[in-house]
Amino acid sequence: MVNKANLFGYLVKHKWRYVRGLFLLILINVLQVLVPKITGQIVDGLETLSLDDRKLLYYGAILILISLMTFVSHFLSRLQVAGASNRFDYEVRNVMFDHMLKLSMKFFHRNRVGELMALATNDLGSLRMITSRGFNLMTNTLILLVSSIFIMVRYVDPRLTLYSFLPLPFLVLVMTKFGPMINRRFRRVQESFSDLTRKTTENITGIRVVKAFVQEDYEKENFAKVNQENFDINMDLVRLQGIFYPLINLISSLSFLIAFVYGGNLIINKQISLGDFIAFNGYLGIIIRPVMSIGMIINFAQRAKASKERIEDLLNEEPDIVDTVPDNPGPGQAEDFHGRIEFRNLTFAYDKKGPNVLENINLTIEPGKTLGIIGKVGSGKSTIANLILRLYDPLEEGQLLIDGVDITKTSLKRLRDNIGYIPQDNFLFSSTIRNNIGFMPEEPTLEEIRRAASISQIDESIMELPDQYDTILGERGVNLSGGQKQRVSIARALVRDPKILIMDDCLSAVDTDTERKILNELKPFMEERTCIIIAHRISSIQDADEIIVLDDGRIIERGSHEELLELNGYYNRIYQRQLLEQEIETA
Ligand code: ADP
C-alpha cells in the first residue's frame, strides 16, 4: 500500500524541541548529581572542623543557586518536551478526524463508536505519555544512573556500590511484573466507574419510564449489582497496591541496609570518610527512582507501540467509496443534474457473503417526477436511498445511473450536492437551529432558511422560541419534539435547493394533518425536482407519479395509486387497513 501512515514522521517534525529539552534535562541532572557531593564535602569539613562561617555560607549559596537553576531548567524543559508532545497530539488528532470523515459507511458499521473514541482517548493518551513523560523518564534515568554510578564507583567505593546494587534488579522485575497488572486493574476501575455513571444517568434521564413501568425494584437490584462489581474491582486494585508499594520499599531498604552495614564497616576501617558515606547514601536515594522507572518505561513503551499500530491501522484504512473524477471535472461535471434516476438490473448486498438486500431492480424516475416506495420493515427501502447517495457501491451487479451516467463516474461532491436527503433518524447537531438548517458549504441567508422552514411547517414554532433561529438545540439548549426535529431536518434538505429530494420515512412523526400541509407546501417545490418518498403511510405517497411496493428486496407491485388499488394486492390491503385505522381515530 502506498502512502502508509507513519506517526513517527509527526514526531520528527518537533525534533528541535526535543533536542532543547534534552539539553535542559542533562543540565538538571548534572545539577542534581552535584548536591550529594557538596553535602559530603560539608560533612567532612564539619567533622575535621576545617569549615568557617564564610565557607559554610559559600556552600549554602551554591546549593541555593543549584536549586534555582534546577527550578528554571525544569520549567523550560517541560515547556519544550510537553510542548512538542502536545503539538504531536494535536496534529495526529486532526489527521485522525479528517481521515475518519473520509471513510465510508461500511467502516462505521464495522467499528463501534466506543472503539473509535478509544483511539482518540486511550491510544492517543498512551502516545502522549511516551512522548512527554516517557521521554523525560528515559533521559533522567539514563543520565542519573550513569553519572551516579560513575561517581559512586570512582569517588566512594566500587565494592560498596556493587553490593548495594544487588537488590536493585529485583526492583526492575517487580515494576515490570506489577506495573501492567496495576494498569489493567486501574483501567477496569475506570471502566466500571463509567458503567456506574452510565447506569445512574440512564436511570435519572429515564426516570419517567422507570416509574411508569414500576421498575424501581428491578433497577435497584441492577444498580446494586453494578455497584458491587465496582466495589470488588476497586478492592482488587487496593489489594495489589497493598503488596506493590511495601515490596518496593522493602527492596530499596535492603539496598540501604547493605550500604549501612558494609559502608559503616568501611568507615570504621578508615577506608572511606563519613562524608563519602553520606554522599553515597545520597546517590543511592537518587538512583532508586530511575531504577524503578526502567520498569515503568518498558510498560509505557509496550503500550505506546500497540497504540501506535492501532492508530496507524486507522490512518491506513482506505475509503472504499472513492472519487473517480476528483478535482478535474469533465464536460458537464460542474453542472446541476437534470435528475433522471435509473436503476438497471441492480442487485445489491451489504456484505459479499450476506444475502441480497435488493434484487434485480429496474426503475426509472424522470426529472420532475415523484416515486413513492412502500414496503415492510427491512424490505430494502432505505437501501435504495443509500445507493443513490453512494453511501455504498453496488457489490453484485447492475448499474445506477443519473442523467444516463453511472453514478460512480460523477464526483461525490457533485452527486451529493445535488441531493437533498431527509434521513429516517433526523439527526440534529447541538448547535443553533440556523446552523442545523444551513448545514452546507455556502451558508444560506436567513430568508432562505426561513423559506425552507415555512415549507416544512416549522417556521412559526421557531419564531416563538426566545432566541428564534439562534436557539441552541440539544443537551445544553432546547429539546424539540420528534415531529419538530423531523421538520427541521426537512428544512435542512430543502434549503440546499437540490435537484433530487429523498425523503426517507421522514413524515412518520408528524400527524396526518401536518403531513398534508407539508406535502401541499412542497408540491410546487417537488414539481421541478425528482423526488423519492419512502413511507409507511399511504397518505404520504398516494400522489406520487409511480409507487413501488418492495418486499424482501424485490419490486412486487408497481403503478399509480389507482392502479395499485385495482391490483387488489399488498398495497390495497395496507390501504384498507390504514383507512380503517383513520376512521377509528376520527370516530
Ligand atoms: P427498510 O428501509 O425497508 O426498513 P433497509 O433498506 O434499511 O430496509 O434494510 C434492508 C435490509 O438490509 C435489512 O435486512 C437490514 O437488516 C439490512 N441492512 C441495512 N443496513 C445494513 C448495513 N449497513 N449492513 C448490513 N445490512 C444492512
Image (cartoon, rainbow, N blue to C red):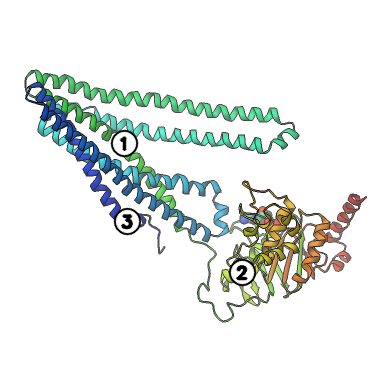
Distance, label 1 to label 3, CA atoms, is 26 Å
Q: Position of residue 106 (x, y in %)?
A: 57, 57
Q: How many marks?
A: 3
Amino acid on which the number 2 mark rests in the picture = Asp
> Please, what secondary structure does the residue beneath circle 2 have?
helix
Sooner in the amino-acid sequence: mark 1 or mark 2? 1
Which residue is denoted by mark 3 in the rendering? Answer: 12
Q: Is residue 378 visible?
A: no
Q: Residue at x 54, y 46 (%)?
A: 114
Find the residue positioned furthest to the front.
54
Amino acid on which the number 1 mark rests in the picture = Gly
Query: Relative to 385, is 305 above or below?
Result: above
Q: Is residue 291 visible?
A: yes
> 10 Å neighbourhood of mark 2: few (<14), some, or many (≥20)?
some
Amino acid on which the number 3 mark rests in the picture = Val
Q: Residue 208 has which mark?
A: none
Q: Position of residue 544 (x, y in %)?
A: 80, 68
Do labels 3 and 2 touch, CB within 8 Å?
no
Q: Is residue 263 left or right of residue 116?
A: left
Q: Quadrant of ligand 1?
A: bottom right
Q: Position of residue 539 (x, y in %)?
A: 83, 60
Distance, label 1 to label 2, CA atoms, is 55 Å
Between 474 and 470, the residue placed more toward the observer is: 470
Which residue is denoted by mark 2 in the rendering? Answer: 417
Between 317 and 481, the residue placed more toward the observer is: 481
Q: Is residue 318 left or right of residue 242?
A: right
> Please, what secondary structure does the residue beneath circle 3 have?
helix
Which residue is denoted by mark 1 in the rendering? Answer: 295
Between label 1 and label 3, give the one nearer the viewer. Answer: 3
Give the quadrant of residue 451: bottom right
Find the residue positioned furthest to the bottom.
331
